[in-house]
Amino acid sequence: MKRFASIIGFLLLVVGLITSVPAVQAQPYPNRPIQLIIPGTAGSIIDIAGRIVAEELGQILGQQVICVVKPGGGFTLGTDFVARSKKDGYTLTYTNSPAIVYSRILNPETVPYDPDKDLEPLGFHSSVVSGVAVQANAPWKDFRELVDYAKNNPGKLRVSTPAWGPRTTSSWRSYSP
């Protein structure tokens, strides 16, 4: 009888705990406006495309998506803002390859975030083909020869990317083929 009373007491305790704890419900996402950080300049192609995406995203989610333009640093300033923001899904970025790839390769000391660890890709929106161009009389016949030259002649090869501005060039810092 004592064992039966212990089992009944334990069951009543469990039922009491379950029914006395208020049910915690997660808030539906999104329940407030979302910021979409655009790391390019106002009126640029990334700004225009980002605003189109924000409008569509807002319609799909049923919540306002507010575009915030944060240019500078070859797209890294706005992207860094998102990397440092609270990881709650309310601060997103519409960024590009210079912020994720090029700046890390050409000038890694200027990129304060690690895109692989600090950012989570949600999707791919558009693709722009990039290429490497050299003068027709250049001594390199393929990309491998260009890379070998850069490695063997530090500071002699100059490159330019659209992420760093139309008049800026930078020494080739590193490349890992």
Image: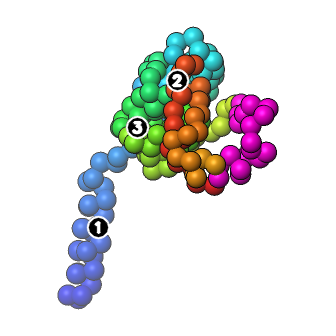
Q: Alpha-carbon distance for marks 2 and 1?
A: 69 Å
Kindly give the residue lying farthest to the left in the view shown: 2
Residue 42 locus on image (x, y percent): 52, 12
Mark 3 vs 1: CB contact within 8 A: no
Nearer the observer: mark 3 or 2; the answer is: 2
- What is the three-letter code of the residue carrying label 3? Thr
Check residue 145 for magenta coloring: yes
Which of 112 and 159 lies nearest the eye of the viewer? 159
Instruction: Name the residue located 26 percent from the left edge and 61 percent from the top edge.
Output: 16
Q: Residues within 10 Å of mark 1 (few under 14, many from 20)?
A: few
Q: Secondary structure at mark 2?
A: loop
Pick the quarter of the image with the C terminus.
Answer: bottom right
Q: How many marks?
A: 3
- Magenta-highlighted residues: 128-148
| Visual colour scheme | rainbow
Residue 161 locus on image (x, y percent): 59, 29
Nearer the observer: mark 3 or 1; the answer is: 3
Q: Which residue is mark 1?
A: 14
- What is the three-letter code of the residue carrying label 2? Thr
Residue 69 locus on image (x, y percent): 47, 18
Q: Is residue 128 visible?
A: yes
- What is the three-letter code of the residue carrying label 1? Val
| First reached walking from the N terminus: tag 3 or tag 1 | 1
Q: Which residue is mark 2?
A: 168
Provide the major secondary structure of the magenta segment. Answer: loop
| Above or below, 11 relative to 96 | below
